[in-house]
Image (cartoon, rainbow, N blue to C red):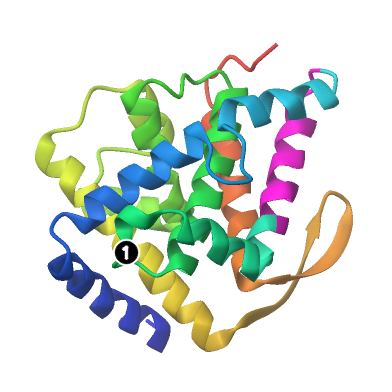
Amino acid sequence: MGLGSIVGRRLAPRVQKLVPDVTHNFVREAMDKAITGIGPLRPAVRAAEKQLADEKGDVAKAVADIVRVHVAYAGAQGFVTNIGGLMTAIAAVPANITGLTLIQVRMIAEIAHLHGHDLNDVKVRRAVVTALLGEDGVKKAVKKKQLPGTPHKLATGPELAPELENMLSLEIATELIARVAGRRLATTIGKRVPVLGGVVGLTADGYATWQLGRYAAREFAKGATPKA
């Protein structure tokens, strides 16, 4: 585990102590704002439907567009901080963390919607925020029995027990803070990754968002009925 992850994982429990139930509120508000819209970001369903219309009903192309747009948002630090600053109820969590979380949740929510999942369903919303852990994070949580399954299984399976719900919120908030702390120490990722056929250099936030978008696209497509 790198220095950034250590710092983040030590910070998250302290943040939780500063504000009662901060992790639960943090995750819940990010989900709510991502779906209903905030500041310059339109509601997730509306934005997703526009991308689908622009691509003449081609879900795969619309999902690729959604990922590309949100990678660009995530790479714009001023934009990320501004969006995070609008989430005033979670003052104990830095604006850059809340802003990036909001952007990533919105991206995942749009992808889930285009694959036919109902964003008004509590199970789907839970699956969306769970996807923030990323493929490796979800696998670890499932192996440790902190989660009963993948985002797809959470979206289509039974309700979670209250204790698992609280554990999930804490795990997600801790992981997000750890990631951001680590990236602020490293500043950028020295990798070049393909996006929509091109090769571009990405910031760490942009690269992480791209990875999450790919994971969400695979996960929510399983057994789903895409939007027509």
Q: How many marks?
A: 1
Q: Is residue 104 magenta?
A: no
| Helix, strand or loop status at disc 1 | loop
Residue 145 rendering spot, x and y as whole percentages: 20, 48
* Quadrant where the N terminus is found in the figure: bottom left
Query: Magenta region's main secondary structure?
Result: helix
Q: Residue at x 57, y 46 (%)?
A: 39
Quadrant of the image occupied by residue 11: bottom left
Residue 31 rendering spot, x and y as whole percentages: 41, 40
Name the residue nearer the viewer: 45 or 1: 45
Mark 1 residue type? Ala
Give the magenta part as a residue range: 57-72
Name the residue nearer the viewer: 126 or 16: 16
Q: Is residue 61 magenta?
A: yes
Q: Residue at x 44, y 45 (%)?
A: 131
Horizontal relation, residue 38 to residue 9: left or right: right
Residue 197 seen from this side? yes
Horizontal relation, residue 180 to residue 167: left or right: right
Residue that mark 1 sits on: 91
Quadrant of the image occupied by residue 9: bottom left
Residue 199 rendering spot, x and y as whole percentages: 86, 64
- The crowd level at tag 1 (other Cα within 10 Å; few <14, some 14-19, many 20+) is some
* Quadrant where the C terminus is found in the figure: top right
Horizontal relation, residue 106 to residue 136: left or right: right
